[in-house]
Amino acid sequence: MSVFFSQHQSVAVVLAVLLASQCLAVRPPPRRTVRAGSLSFSQAVKPSKVDLDLCKFCIDFSQQAIQQLLNIILQVGVVGTCADLCQALADKTGSQALGVACNLLCDIEGVKEFVNLIEKADLDPIYYCELLKQCTIKDDGDAKITSLGVNPMSGPQGTFIIDVEYESKNGTGTGELVVDIDTVDGIPLGQGFITEAQEAGKYGQKISLKAEPNPDCDPTQGPCESFQPGNYGVRVAICNGECGSKHPHSQIYDQGMTNFTITG
């Protein structure tokens, strides 16, 4: 491994922590809006052995920065160097960490190609990082949901655990696991989670849903989910690339449905 690449990996590790922390002035928009309650993500059964280096770092960066970079390009055109473009990003967002991350990724391809890829990706973070050659592409991947349930299946407002297990025969590409909840009052609730490329094997994901009203939800900004008593549908999709994307290297591997009940 070259000294250049090793140093860039070390920088990426530090920046990845910053990008995931509250240190940044700009937070990434959620993949899907969660109006009330919260979804969290944890992995179980078998971890991936695929070493992806800068993939997660790249996706975290692009989720936060790609819209801002497009705005800069539209407003001022293509700037001369990576340093110029990335400083403009840092100034616009108030985040020096984003500026440093931008420089790290821009230096890989050069500013002209970096900008071309931003425009080509069309706000798809996974596809963008695949174009930058930072995330694994695997078009012959697969995944089949083998078990999908909720614990508890019935109970009062509180925390419900959505348990997903799946198996891959050929391995998976960089993608997304999306959870959507069909609520009693019809308010959209759901979120997508990035899944890094995995080798063939059996995997599990646990998604924690806090099914109770969010005291911080502002009804002037949109409807607030109250989690009324009744039956709630749960839809899960495992995808290569971003679920629903029309870009190359994107497909739905499998989908599943289950439900749970909130009692009065």
Image (cartoon, helix red, strand yellow):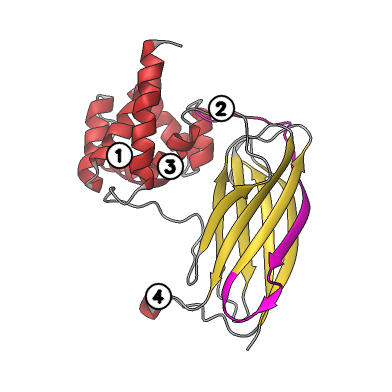
Residue 24 locus on image (x, y percent): 29, 48
Closer to the chain start, of discs 2 and 4, is: 2
User: From the viewer's perspective, is residue 134 above or below residue 66?
Assistant: above
| Residue 89 against residue 208 in the figure, above or below | above
Q: Vertical placement of 129 versus 215: above or below?
A: above
**Amino acid type of the residue tagged 1 in the rendering:** Leu
Q: Is residue 245 visible?
A: no
Chain-order first, disc 4 or disc 1: 1
Q: Residue 18, position in %: x, y?
A: 33, 42
Whether residues under marks 2 and 3 lie with C-beta atoms below 8 angstroms apart, the answer is no
| Left or right: where 24 falls relative to 105 | left
Q: Which residue is mark 2?
A: 51
The amino acid pointed to by label 3 is Asp
The residue tagged 1 is 98
**Residue 148 pos. (x, y %):** 74, 59
Residue 102, quarter of picture: top left
**Element under label 4?**
loop
Camera-near label (2 vs 3) is 2
Secondary structure under tag 2 reads loop
How far separated are the C-alphas under marks 2 and 3?
17 Å
Q: What kind of element bears circle 1? A: helix
| Badge 1 vs badge 3, beta-carbon distance below 8 Å | no
